[in-house]
Image: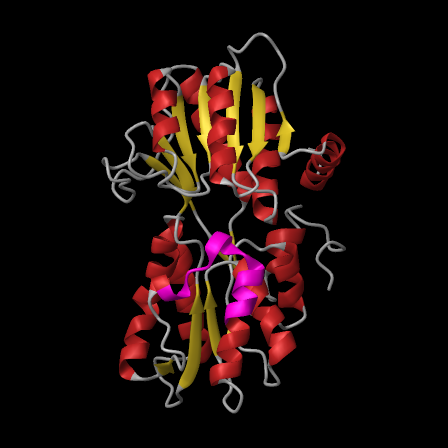
Amino acid sequence: MKKFLSVVLSSTMLIAFAGCTSSETNTSTDTSNLVGVSMPTQDLQRWNQDGENMKAQLESAGYDVDLQYAANDIATQVSQIENMISGGVKTLVVASIDGSALGTVMEQAKSNGIEVIAYDRLIMGTDAISYYSTFDNWDVGVKQGEYIVDKLKLDSTDETYTIEFITGDPGDNNINFFFGGAMSILQPYLDEGTLECLSGQTEQTEVATVNWATDVAQARFENILASYYTDTDLDIVLASNDSTAQGVTNALVSSYDGAYPLLTGQDCDVVSVQNIISGKQEMSIFKDTRDLAAKTVEMVDALMKGSEPPINDNKTYDNGTGIIPSYLCEPVVATLNNYEALLIETGYYTAEEVQP
């Protein structure tokens, strides 16, 4: 099996040559095997991996693939999906930019008899969604919270630790699960005073980050550090993912003289793995997108063949029109102690890629 890196590199070169946000558009006149894959952006490493990996696996399964990246622009994503519909796709896989902004175009898909799988981000407020493939997103937050509790022995300590919070885009339904799962673990320690948030910013709306953007996260944390942590150590930062964690790290480098806090993350981006190795980030949640892509390909294959796709959850994800049948993959904690086994030995990265 060819290394995943080669798939990403070859596709990246194709994108650069074409000079557009689209990875590849199917040009065949036969659309009977055509699958549309809509990804939100190429600005975050994980969406490049998800999109290219799924495209490779779908093509290996015998399907033609129209893969598009929307540059984090909702109107662009809507237009790209409309073009996929008019181009004759039989099944759509959509990772939305804003889960509440695609209702109209999803209805177009439904009226054309196109099955839609929401990928990793649930699309809200429409019954045009057939299935949902993702990781157990509540468990992502739970694992982050439990890591903090276990690492600092919060159940038995007499110490008080300072903590700040950052999560992702307010239009991404996943932050309800990431942040909610983490706070289900950490809120009791805030209530009893073992954890103290000096900024007072503990509500999801206060700690959200538009587009999960690293620069937005950095700007917010530079302000927090300057306002609350000039004479006090910051002990913990609960960051829902790696792009926001990297913003926190950038702020720490530029604006903080103390020891690095225990910093969480998610996605095992290369930069964050490098930061784990160099001691700037404590952990990340590894979500093996190869597994999620493989399961999504299974779901697409079943739909294209008129059979029932695999699901393992029929109770968790309600998009406002009812429960969406889902398949949830398992997230795994990655740290300095196990990153080599999780990421290097499995071929997800090479050792050279992640060296600081």
> How is colour applied across the structure in the image?
secondary structure
Q: Residue at x 56, y 67 (%)?
A: 218
The spot of residue 136 in percent (x, y) is 39, 48
268 left or right of 202 in image: right
Residue sitting at x 51%, y 32%: 38
Task: Name which quarter of the figure residue 175 lies in.
Answer: bottom left
Q: Is residue 219 magenta?
A: yes
The N terminus lies in quadrant: top right
Location of residue 242 with respect to 201 vertically, above or below = above
Q: Position of residue 65 (x, y in %)?
A: 57, 22
Residue 328: x, y in percent? 39, 42
Residue 312 percent location from the top left of the image: 34, 38
Q: Is residue 276 left or right of 130 when viewed as pictured? A: right
| Chain part drawn in magenta | 206-220
Is residue 30 or residue 74 the one in the foreground? 74
Residue 107's place in the image compared with 179, above or below, is above
Q: Who's the residue at 34% across and 21% down the image?
A: 110
Residue at 28% over, 75% down: 188
Between residues 254 and 335, which one lies in front from this camera angle? 254
Q: Quadrant of the C terminus?
A: bottom right
Taking the image as drawn, is residue 298 in sight?
A: no
For the question of whether residue 202 can be seen, the reply is yes
In the image, 173: left or right of 74?
A: left
Residue 122: image quadrant is top left
Residue 326 against residue 195 in the figure, above or below: above
The answer to whether residue 135 is magenta is no
